[in-house]
């Protein structure tokens, strides 16, 4: 009578396993496309704006449009993924991104700054929606205990995609710099990328995701009220503070540190420094999970954050090639901070994780904005002194990781929270 039951369970487990593998692969592909689109846009924007004869003020607004899109869409993402699920949220994010890239073509054709700005805002909105969905979805596409490993592996695709976007963007600029129709040559890759994104949307729709990717809240469950419960958990508050520091440190390491490297090695060598930075960042997110197979994730995070502090300290006293190696070391060790903290904050929250993910990305975005303004205000300081900021941020993250090692992670026991997912 029960002879068929074990076989049914085995087949079901195999089916769920391959569903998870397929879902992780397309999620990683979406993350790579996120990094590629983001870097291609930022690489082509200055020359595209120049070809469009935009003023300095209009070009600054175009840059800010991406940030405005992020700010406008990050928190509303919670409404989308709570009511329609992660899978629909990912497709919607790709759709926003594709529309934004498509609109650049009429912006160039009609030389309309309004279209140009709207395209930038739509692009930023799509990137924000994709980031919230992908970082949260990777946490739940498998066993709870390996959430940090999956998060790091999928997020490793972002710097790899950015590396590809940077290389292709620079090549496009070199090929079109002397052409009379330079604006059309620069907008064509963006339009083509939009078409590839539409193709990925159809692919994701065809892939069968695990049931967790399609779960929706009941109609009686208010999303507005779901923003408060996560902050009742002190571990979530600590994770939010750590992410605030994390994105600020990453901003300086990828921005001000590259300016520092440019002064060390001016000219074409700057491109090699930037490409090496992307590669090292991806390598860190691939190597970090290997240590997490042997040691607890928070132990690895504490060790890597401590190493980041040492590398940043070395950059304040070293010069030349040695300082450059310290920069790459800081990028390597800091790379696991964002995905590891994110997974630690969300892995026990289940449905509350959808709102929690939106809140965490918004907090991280605010952290990068605040630290960016801080960098501008203290610009008179030397670049070496500037490198103390990511070191201070990483020291805070190290303390967070040490604390989380000694705290048994509890579910969020608050009104509205659902039962913890067990794998």
Image: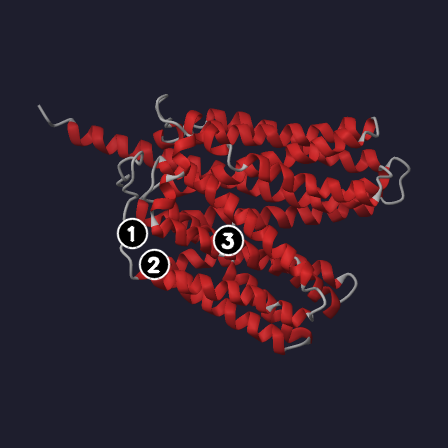
Asked if the residue under mark 2 is in contact with the one under mark 1, i.e. CB atoms within 8 Å, the reply is: yes
The quadrant in which residue 98 appears is: top right
Q: Earlier in the sequence, mark 2 or mark 3?
A: 3
> What residue is rendered at 30% in x and 43% in y?
412
Q: Earlier in the sequence, mark 1 or mark 3?
A: 3
Label 1 crowd bin: few (<14), some (14–19), many (20+), radius 10 Å: few
For residue 107, side relative to residue 167 (left or right) = right
Q: Which mark is residue 404?
A: 2
Q: Which mark is residue 409?
A: 1
Badge 2 marks a residue whose secondary structure is helix
Asked if the residue under mark 3 is in contact with the one under mark 2, i.e. CB atoms within 8 Å, the reply is: no
Could you tell me residue 348's position as x and y percent? 32, 44
Seen as rendered, the residue at the extreme bottom is 317
Badge 1 marks a residue whose secondary structure is loop
Q: Is residue 240 visible?
A: yes
In whole angstroms, how far apart are the C-alphas of marks 2 and 3? Answer: 17 Å
Seen as rendered, the residue at the extreme left is 1
Above or below, 352 against 292 in this view is above
In whole angstroms, how far apart are the C-alphas of marks 1 and 2? Answer: 8 Å
Badge 3 marks a residue whose secondary structure is helix
Q: Nearer the viewer, residue 223 or 126?
A: 223
Mark 2, mark 3: which one is toward the viewer?
A: 3
Mark 1, mark 3: which one is toward the viewer?
A: 3
Could you tell me residue 38's position as x and y percent? 64, 43
Q: Is residue 21 visible?
A: no
Question: Which of the image's four quarters has the N terminus?
Answer: top left
The residue where tag 3 is placed is: 244
Q: Which mark is residue 20?
A: none
> What residue is rendered at 50% in x and 59% in y?
284
Above or below, 292 against 109 in this view is below
For residue 237, side relative to residue 267 (left or right) = left
């Amino acid at each position: 009578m029960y002879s068929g039951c074990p076989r049914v369970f085995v087949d079901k487990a195999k089916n769920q396993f391959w569903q998870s593998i397929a879902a992780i692969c397309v999620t990683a592909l979406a993350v790579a496309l996120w990094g590629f689109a983001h870097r291609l846009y930022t690489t082509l924007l200055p020359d595209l704006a120049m070809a469009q004869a935009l003023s300095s003020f209009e070009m600054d607004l175009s840059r800010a449009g991406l940030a405005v899109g992020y700010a406008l869409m990050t928190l509303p993402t919670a409404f989308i993924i709570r009511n329609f699920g992660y899978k629909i949220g990912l497709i919607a994010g790709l759709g926003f991104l594709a529309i934004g890239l498509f609109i650049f073509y009429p912006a160039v054709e009609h030389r309309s700054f309004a279209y140009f700005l709207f395209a930038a805002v739509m692009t930023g909105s799509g990137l924000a929606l994709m980031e919230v969905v992908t970082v949260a979805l990777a946490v739940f596409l498998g066993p709870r205990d390996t959430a940090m490993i999956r998060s790091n592996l999928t997020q490793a695709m972002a710097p790899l995609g950015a590396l590809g976007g940077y290389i292709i963007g620079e090549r496009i600029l070199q090929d079109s710099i002397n052409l009379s129709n330079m604006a059309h040559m620069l907008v064509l890759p963006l339009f083509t990328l939009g078409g590839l994104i539409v193709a990925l949307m159809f692919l994701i729709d065809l892939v069968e995701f695990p049931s967790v990717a399609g779960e929706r809240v009941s109609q009686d469950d208010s999303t507005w009220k779901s923003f408060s419960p996560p902050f009742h958990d002190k571990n979530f508050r600590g994770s939010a503070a750590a992410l605030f520091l994390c994105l600020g440190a990453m901003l300086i390491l990828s921005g001000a540190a590259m300016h520092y490297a440019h002064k060390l090695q001016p000219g074409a060598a700057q491109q090699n420094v930037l490409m090496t930075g992307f590669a090292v960042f991806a390598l860190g997110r691939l190597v970090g999970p290997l240590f997490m197979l042997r040691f607890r994730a928070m132990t690895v995070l504490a060790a890597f954050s401590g190493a980041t502090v040492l590398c940043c300290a070395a950059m304040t006293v070293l010069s030349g090639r040695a300082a450059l190696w310290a920069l790459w070391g800081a990028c390597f060790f800091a790379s696991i901070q964002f995905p590891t903290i994110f997974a630690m904050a969300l892995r026990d929250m289940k449905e509350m994780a959808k709102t929690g993910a939106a809140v965490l990305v918004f907090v991280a975005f605010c952290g990068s904005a605040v630290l960016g303004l801080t960098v501008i205000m203290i610009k008179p300081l030397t670049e070496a002194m500037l490198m103390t900021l990511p070191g201070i941020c990483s020291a805070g993250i190290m303390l967070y990781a040490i604390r989380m090692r000694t705290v048994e992670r509890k579910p969020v026991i608050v009104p509205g929270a659902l039962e913890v997912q067990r794998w």
